[in-house]
Amino acid sequence: MSSKSHHKVIILGSGPAGLTAAIYTGRANLSPLLIHGPLPGGQLTTTTEVENFPGFPEGVMGPDLMQLMEKQAGRFGTSIQMDTISAADISKRPFTLTGSNAVYTCDALIIATGATPKLLGLPCERTLMGYGVSTCATCDGAFFRDRIIVVNGGGDSACEEANFLTRFGKKVYLVHRRDQLRASKIMQERVMKNPKIEIVWNSQIVDIKGSKEAGVSAITIKDTKTGQTRDLACDAVFIAIGHSPNSSLFKGQLRMDENGYIVPEPNSAKTDKPGVFVCGDVQDHVFRQAITAAGSGCMAAIECERWLESQE
Ligand code: NAP
């Protein structure tokens, strides 16, 4: 039978938002419990060097930065627990979270569950993930030096990744399903000016060919105007078609936008449920930076502390 425990504050998620909320609520003597899933540290653990986090003039490796944040949270009395939460009931207080190992209740909840890269939904994509298919150019780009690389998507992420990947690949195809990029003008210009990038317009990837042993050998693309398919030889495919917020636990319980991002009150981390706060990428589809996530984690913690005080 699973155990039960009660906490003043529970933080869900261990990326920069969750760990910053832990540092602040810990320093406020709230002894927070931080719960994370099987991949602690959030998206930064899948990047290599982070060059734009203030305080690290020489850059810092993503996993190292997360370890430092975890150590700092621990210093102020945060307990960290790995568990997969399958249900959340925030309809009444205390709030209840049901995990695989235990049932947790809390007076206040800080949601910092982040976002997950979207996939195309092709079976081959999952099989070849890590064997030539990737969602993270910074993590995996260096494996494809002097190779032919495909980036899929037409937004800022795809353009940024395509540009970045020209540092390694001898040729980068940017495959986009329409005849216009969604990316900002400046990103579009960088792509257009880069001699190593060729845009493949009106094209949807319908298959990725290869094996775990040999890696990726080609993609099959379907022309979205004519319906014709053809193969394009390549060694790697980077999927950059956006992110999905990890908010399904709270669907129907919290205000969300049409894409499932939790919507806090303006200039605040408060959700529409008193005692529930939100920070990081699960509420931010615009900036999606470690530093903005950390900043919103700080906001959530301060508002949480004030809210708890007002309840006493
Ligand atoms: P995004 O703007 O939502 O773009 C996603 C792209 O993927 C779109 O071009 C979309 O095509 C395509 N796409 C979506 N689903 C697809 C599917 N199933 N098959 C094929 N293509 C598909 O996502 P993002 O590029 O990750 O950017 C998200 C936010 O972060 C944006 O606000 C962006 O400005 C910001 N961001 C900023 C920077 C920066 O400023 N340095 C860098 C990265 C991201 P359609 O165009 O046809 O819809």
Image (cartoon, rainbow, N blue to C red):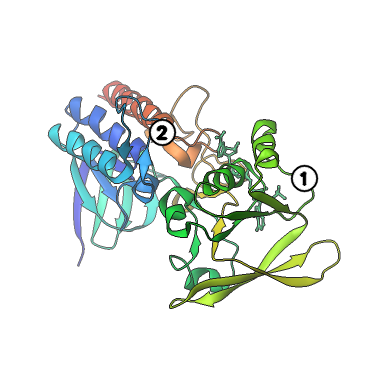
In percent of width and height, residue 115 lies at 47, 47
The kind of residue tagged 1 is Gln
For residue 289, side relative to residue 121 (left or right):
left
Mark identifier at residue 180 = 1
As drawn, the residue found furthest toward the right would be 226
Q: Quadrant of ligand 1?
A: top right
In percent of width and height, residue 79 lies at 17, 43
| Mark 1 beta carbon near ligand 1 (under 8 Å) | yes
Mark identifier at residue 293 = 2
Q: Residues within 10 Å of mark 2 (few under 14, many from 20)?
A: many
In front: 67, or 163? 163
In percent of width and height, residue 22 lies at 25, 35
- For residue 218, above or below residue 68: below
- Tell me if residue 288 can be seen: yes
The kind of residue tagged 2 is Ala
Q: Residues within 10 Å of mark 1 (few under 14, many from 20)?
A: few
Q: Quadrant of residue 131?
A: bottom left
In percent of width and height, residue 227 lies at 82, 69
- For residue 18, above or below residue 144: above
- Tell me if residue 109 can be seen: no
Q: Count every numbered label the image shows and give the total.
A: 2
Q: Residue at x 21, y 41 (%)?
A: 7
Q: Residue at x 32, y 55 (%)?
A: 39
In front: 216, or 310? 216
Q: Residue at x 61, y 71 (%)?
A: 218
Q: Quadrant of residue 95?
A: top left
For residue 189, side relative to residue 119 (left or right):
right
